[in-house]
Image: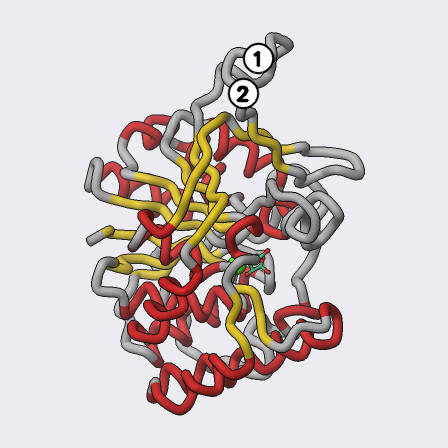
């Protein structure tokens, strides 16, 4: 099993991913660290506490960054995830917010130090907490087992970006942080739109989950209503792409993914801010800013049926 710290901005698909990680036999969801993104940091943290309590997850929760390192904040994605981050599902205002005393980046560093080689960081929101952790204790690069990121987009037509023609939301929200995380000397696997757009929760799939998967199935159906409305009105699709749960699937079953190796960098400013580029031709380019960086794994193909079957089975 992989012992994971799940860094997240819940978030509708984040909530779907948390329940998947919690139930997965290959995963030990030991902690949830929160970050702004789909919602404000306070709403994201309250949502994480709500899920932790309602589904008896038993994870430690640590509260993370309220905004990006350098760029102007983009603000919560109300149009996709609703006013508070989980569509029409509102965590009670008096929800107990039972969190660790340390900020998320410090919690990450200390857990990784305490269990060298054991912890996989799975990050499915803006990468601010991970960048702050790297700054706080650069040696964690040698001590984490792996870093799995849902974010970025490298593909062709239709899977390029989702918040701009070239940028995916998590990277666009904090491009400086993403560039630091991708160029650090630790093993990163990137589960981006190239593969998350290959896997689809159709209306029917979610209806069946509601019928067959008890309280978790009912919750996933409920939380997905707002999301599906966005997908149908804005994208003309009857269902939704499977973003954050795909990162959990990678942590549990990497053999379902085909990856490509090469250093990855992020455009940090200007109209292409948040664009991700992988150098895939070793030795070809000598004008640099590229070759000194570690080769990371970018996912390019996925066995979608395996994910859909596994998600249903686990939930
Ligand atoms: C990513 O952005 C957020 O809206 C989702 O939760 C996911 O992490 C997809 O681009
Ligand atoms: Ca997310």
- Nearest the eye: 208 or 245: 208
**Rendered residue at 78%/35% (across/down):** 270
- Nearest the eye: 218 or 153: 153
**Rendered residue at 29%/41% (across/down):** 110
User: Does dot 1 land on a helix, a strand or a loop?
Assistant: loop
Q: Which mark is residue 284?
A: 1
- Nearest the eye: 151 or 72: 151
Q: Residue furthest right?
A: 271
> Where's residue 75, x and y in %?
69, 58
> Where's residue 284, x and y in %?
57, 12
Above or below, 254 relative to 178? below
Tell me the quadrant of the picture where the C terminus can be found. bottom left
**Rendered residue at 44%/50% (across/down):** 123
Query: Which residue, given by chain and number where applicable, does mark 2 sit on?
Result: 281
Q: Residue 287 occupies which quadrant of the picture?
A: top right
Q: Is residue 280 left or right of residue 24?
A: right
Q: CA distance from mark 2 to mark 1?
A: 6 Å
Above or below, 182 relative to 225? above
**In this orientation, does residue 93 appear?**
no
**Rendered residue at 44%/58% (across/down):** 246
Q: What is the crowding at mark 2: few (fewer than 14 residues within 10 Å), some, or many (at least 20)?
A: few
User: Does dot 2 land on a helix, a strand or a loop?
Assistant: loop
Quarter of image, ligand 1: bottom right
> Where's residue 129, x and y in %?
47, 45
Q: Which mark is residue 88?
A: none
> Where's residue 280, x and y in %?
53, 25
Q: Is residue 156 left or right of residue 261?
A: right
Q: What is the crowding at mark 1: few (fewer than 14 residues within 10 Å), some, or many (at least 20)?
A: few
Label pair 2/1, CB-CB below 8 angstroms? yes
Q: Is residue 227 left or right of residue 3?
A: right
Q: Residue furthest top?
A: 286
Above or below, 144 relative to 231? above
């Amino acid at each position: 099993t992989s012992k994971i710290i799940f860094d997240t901005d819940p978030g509708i698909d984040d909530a779907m991913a948390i329940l998947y990680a919690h139930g997965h036999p290959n995963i030990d969801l030991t902690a949830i660290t929160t970050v702004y993104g789909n919602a404000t940091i306070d709403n994201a943290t309250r949502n994480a506490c709500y899920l932790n309590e309602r589904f008896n997850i038993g994870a430690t929760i640590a509260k993370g960054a309220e905004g990006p390192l350098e760029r102007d904040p983009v603000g919560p994605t109300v149009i996709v995830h609703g006013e508070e981050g989980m569509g029409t599902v509102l965590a009670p205002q008096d929800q107990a917010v039972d969190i660790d005393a340390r900020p998320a980046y410090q919690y990450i560093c200390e857990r990784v130090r305490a269990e060298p080689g054991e912890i996989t960081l799975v990050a499915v929101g803006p990468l601010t907490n991970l960048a702050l952790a790297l700054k706080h204790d650069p040696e964690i690069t040698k001590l984490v087992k792996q870093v799995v990121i849902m974010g970025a987009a490298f593909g062709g037509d239709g899977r390029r970006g989702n918040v701009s023609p070239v940028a995916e939301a998590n990277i666009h929200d904090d491009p400086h942080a993403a560039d630091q995380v991708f160029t650090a000397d630790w093993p990163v696997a990137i589960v981006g739109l190239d593969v998350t757009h290959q896997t689809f929760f159709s209306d029917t799939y979610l209806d069946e989950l509601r019928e067959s998967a008890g309280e978790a199935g009912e919750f996933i159906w409920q939380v997905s209503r707002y999301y599906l409305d966005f997908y149908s009105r804005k994208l003309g699709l009857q269902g939704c792409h499977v973003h954050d749960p795909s990162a959990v699937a990678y942590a549990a079953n990497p053999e379902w993914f085909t990856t490509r190796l090469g250093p990855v960098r992020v455009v940090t400013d200007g109209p292409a801010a948040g664009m991700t580029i992988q150098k895939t031709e070793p030795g070809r380019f000598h004008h640099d800013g590229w070759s000194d960086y570690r080769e990371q794994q970018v996912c390019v193909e996925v066995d979608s049926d395996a994910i859909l079957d596994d998600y249903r089975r686990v939930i």
